[in-house]
Image (cartoon, rainbow, N blue to C red):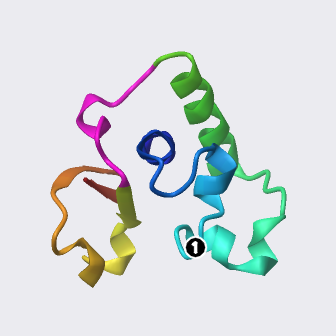
Amino acid sequence: QVTWNRVESRQWGTSVCKVVYAPSQFSWTADPSKRFKSPRNADWLTSERIVSDYTQGLRVTKLDDATYFHATRLGRPQWTRNLKKRLAIGNHVFYD
């Protein structure tokens, strides 16, 4: 949902690929050793299901405007200080 919110804002790019591969936005795209791997673990399968649900219209209402997120293992990164916290889901915190 954050990725699509970024596409709609046009600030990071005008397509999912442009947003995902925008410089320094997602840790897995910033690391060349991870960028082109095809994972097939449980987390990947969950991600596929979530994308499928999203494309079928399922939304998390509180994330309608969220354009940022981070993993909780990072604490609260400095770059979030001027952002509004929207919601925490599992190991991620979302902001707009």
Depth check: 88 or 69 in front? 69
The residue labelled by disc 1 is 27
Label 1 neighbour load within 10 Å: few <14, some 14-19, many 20+: some
Q: Secondary structure at mark 1?
A: helix
Q: Main secondary structure of the magenta part?
A: loop
> Residue at left 63%, top 44%?
15
- Residue 25 image point, x, y percent: 52, 69
Q: Is residue 91 visible?
A: no
Residue 59 counted in the magenta span: yes
> Residue at left 56%, top 16%?
56
9 to the left or right of 16: left
Q: Quadrant of the image for the N terminus? A: top left
User: Which quadrant of the figure has residue 30?
Assistant: bottom right
User: Which quadrant of the figure has residue 50?
Assistant: top right
56 to the left or right of 88: right
Amino acid bearing label 1: Ser
49 to the left or right of 32: left
- The magenta stretch is 58-67
> Residue at left 23%, top 36%?
62
Q: Is residue 87 above or below residue 28?
A: above
